Image (tube, rainbow, N blue to C red):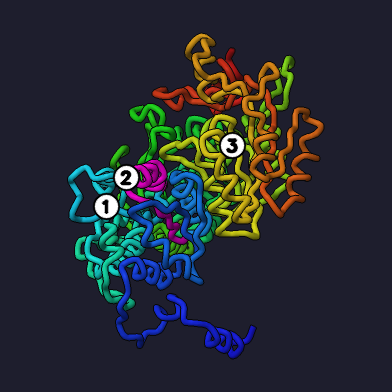
Amino acid sequence: MSETTMAARAASRPPSPADLAGRPSAQPRTVTGAQSLVLSLEALEVGTVFGIPGGAILPAYDPLLDSVKVRHVLVRHEQGAGHAATGYAAATGKVGVCMATSGPGATNLVTPIADAYMDSIPIVAITGQVAARVIGTDAFQEADIRGITMPITKHNYLVTDPADIPRALAEAFHVASSGRPGPVLVDITKDALTATTTFSWPPTFDLPGYRPVTKPHQKQIKAAAALIREAKSPVLYIGGGVIRAGASAALCELVELTQIPLVTTLMARGAVPDSHELHLGMPGMHGSVAAVTALQKSDLLITLGARFDDRVTGELSSFAPLAKVIHADIDPAEISKNRVADVPIVGDCLEVITELTKALREDIDAGRGGDYAAWRTRTTKWKATYPLGYTVAEDATAIAPQYVIERIGALTGPEGTYVAGVGQHQMWAAQFVQYERPNSWLNSGGLGTMGYSVPAAMGAKEAEPDRVVWAIDGDGCFQMTNQELATCVINNIPIKVAIINNSSLGMVRQWQTLFYGQRYSNTDLHTSASGTRVPDFVKLADAYGCVGLRCEKPEDVDATIQKALEINDRPVVIDFVVERDAMVWPMVPAGVSNDQVTVARAMTPVWDREDDEAGEETP
């Protein structure tokens, strides 16, 4: 459509809030606080808001109905709204927006807000609040959501003056998306929404105490380059901060230049293509043997946007005992929090990697580059000796869950987006899908929120409708938020859901098997074992208006996935009935040194007699 035609069409209809907000010369206009809120959202180019109306936020929903820019997706539970906003943001890097009313509506957002905080996801949560005059009186549906979320937001606001709404929104979006990304809450009282005010855009704001440092100090860059040059066995330890900073391409350039082996944490899957020969996999409790061991035996960790999470370090006192540490992060509070850094670098990962590459290139061009050939040989040997894999038990009566996930990834390809719940299926999805691009893997890494998958997949699909989006969920996780399938059906968001149904809370059952003498206390969900189907997931999908499929034989897996891939006019739910006692391996039990990584039950690699004679195993 030509600009002339678009202009003619725009002139033929009444000006929308976006039209008005986009007129820089427009004079301040008299509006209600609610109208000012919608105008602000449009001026901030918000495409989608996930939410549910209620008494305190209701004034905002009236002008929202007239918006031609903001699409509101009516979810079935506020937790779904929050996770959908998170999925939207994680898939695109844009700020996700969710909205809820006061009291229980707002408190239902607490979990996804905490989730976004732990995983550094930029979202803005807008909540209605009771009228200012009754705050503190235990008014109906009153909750101090600002106080409740203080520890789990980057910042939050209580707005009681309608004149403050545009500024609060503009600041919230700026804070959420800059520095270390994260959630910001804007709580607006009902009387502020209904009162009369004036609206003009853009608002002016000044945040004197908020100045994220993005540019690294050159002294620290030079010190890091010197350590890298002197190291014999360095590892690039890549965290989710690299993806949040949009630094994946720059990182690949650094890897190619230095030829240093690398690992990507659970949150960084896809930061470097899995197919890269120097990629050793994911470290941590269920990481690859090569990745865990490389960190453990390294003499230098080049840590970029990672936080030394306990799931990565295992017993911290024994983690990578020989390694010096370069730690780069935009959040200075992360540096030396868990492991003391020899070279701390505060800065945006993209700028840090760019400067580090520049410094190292000068060294290499001058013939002063490091020599890591012997180290690469060792790490490559570990990778070849202990590849990720799985063995189907001889007495297995159902499909191996790893096989299902492996085939979903293979048949969908790297352009798909994979959103996992939390548990065994999450670890298998991290292990057996090949990730070749950033933002193709979404999950709840920090908080570990069961129920994340379906609504987050909904948000990701809403943000990128042309991609295939899979929610890889467990039968336990799925039952926590599957009501959002109704939202997907009604709003034409055709996600695909693969339920890895082992009729159990699988990860808990695995721990009960290994550490509690097979006493399965309250982990049987009765969703497939012994012929019981409570609920029957196919019938449930059908009731929601989705396509429901069931797969119970390995030979049917590919055909079932292909059928799902061919359906794009509504959500598809596949009930994959899988082996109940399959376990996630490798494993480092909680609180144990990474030296004790096990590749299967009671099977620990034997290392370094002389030259890492990896390959022997002890029963």
Answer whether labels 2 and 1 touch (C-beta < 8 Å): yes
Which residue is disc 2 drawn over? Answer: 103
User: Which of pointers 1 and 3 indicates the residue nearer the eye?
Assistant: 1
Q: Amino acid at mark 1?
A: Val
Which three-letter amino acid code belongs to the residue tagged 2? Gly
Foreground: 384 or 411? Answer: 411
Mark 2 vs mark 1, CA separation in Å: 9 Å
Which disc number belongs to residue 473?
A: 3
Query: Would you name the residue on which mark 1 appears?
Result: 130
| Place of residue 246 in the rendered image (x, y in percent of width and height, measured from the top left) | 48, 60
Instruction: Please tell me whether mark 2 sits on a helix, a strand or a loop.
Output: loop
Q: Is residue 90 visible?
A: yes
Q: Which mark is residue 579?
A: none
**Which region is colored magenta?**
94-119
**Earlier sequence position, callout 2 versus callout 3:** 2
Residue 400 lies in quadrant: top right
